[in-house]
Amino acid sequence: MISYAMFSRTGGRERNEDSVLMCEQGFGAAFALADGLGGHGKGDAASSIVTDQAIRIFKKTGNDPDYLSHAFQSAQGRLMQKKEAMGIREEMKSTMVLLQVTGEYARWAHIGDSRLYYFKDFHIIDRTKDHSVPQMLVNAGQITENEIRRHADRNKLLRVLGTPWENSSYDVSEPVALSECQAFLLCTDGFWELIREKEMEKTLKQSRSVAQWLEKMEKIVLKRGAGSDMDNYSAICVYVDKR
């Protein structure tokens, strides 16, 4: 049983360069979230192109075990083609995170610093690791996880869609068998930078529905971001309960 809620907000910016999409098909579903880079209309175009392409592939392949790889490869190809047609080199890039839920398992993939958090029994079990300079410093033991949020180089990404790849630059998780009391949060950096992991867990435990969970978290994001030039912020919350 799958239930979900999602939104994409402009924050304090003139344009919303984030994009969220989902599709249910048969006994499965796919959720796509992206944060475009480039400004002047190119970031929102990039995020829209890659999420749209990811969902197009899901509609064609459904619960194919290789869906996530196909989706990322196709999204990268489509975005690079669009850039070439427009004569764009450096601009028009995007992060992306995808969640695939079948009748038996959930699996996810990502590139950039848009994140997926996996919860079981109201606790975070796993999260994607950012492809960013601060995450690299965390991996090297030079800063802590919490310091990512305030780091001067937090927007410097090492891997994105829309730049040439020598190898596949996205990461794919192992499948997670479906069971009781599972939840997933997909979100852009404009969202996760303004809410702590303990607050995600607390609001999840306090909520009676996936929509209420998302609403409670948004209140925290808005309160913490008040008075600042808030970035676009987007999130998708998914409950999965197999009984």
Image (cartoon, rainbow, N blue to C red):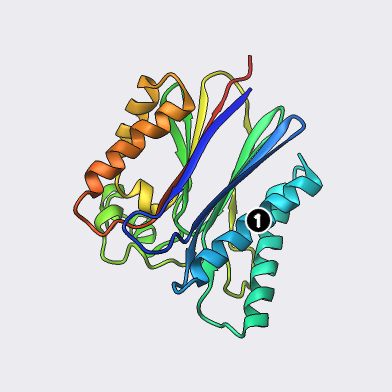
Which residue bears the numbered disc 1? Answer: 52
Residue at the bottom extreme, as displayed: 87
Residue at the front extreme, as displayed: 14
219 sits to left or right of 159 = left
204 versus 37 height, above or below: above
Residue at the right extreme, as displayed: 60
In the picture, the quarter occupied by the C terminus is top right
171 sits to left or right of 229 = right
215 versus 80 height, above or below: above
Q: Where residue 142 sits in the image (x, y, percent)?
A: 28, 58
242 versus 60 height, above or below: above
Q: How many marks?
A: 1
27 versus 88 height, above or below: above
Q: From where the camera sits, is residue 3 visible?
A: yes
Q: From where the camera sits, is residue 160 visible?
A: no
225 sits to left or right of 47 = left
Dot 1: what SS?
helix
Q: Residue at x 43, y 51 (%)?
A: 188
Residue at the top extreme, as displayed: 243
Between 6 and 160, the one lying in front of the other is 6
Label 1 crowd bin: few (<14), some (14–19), many (20+), radius 10 Å: some
Between 124 and 242, the one lying in front of the other is 242
For the residue marked with disc 1, what is the amino acid?
Asp
Between 203 and 10, the one lying in front of the other is 10
In the picture, the quarter occupied by the N terminus is top right
Q: Where residue 183 sits in the image (x, y, percent)?
A: 50, 29
Q: Residue at x 42, y 24 (%)?
A: 122
Q: Where residue 9 sits in the image (x, y, percent)?
A: 41, 50
Q: Where residue 219 sits in the image (x, y, percent)?
A: 30, 37
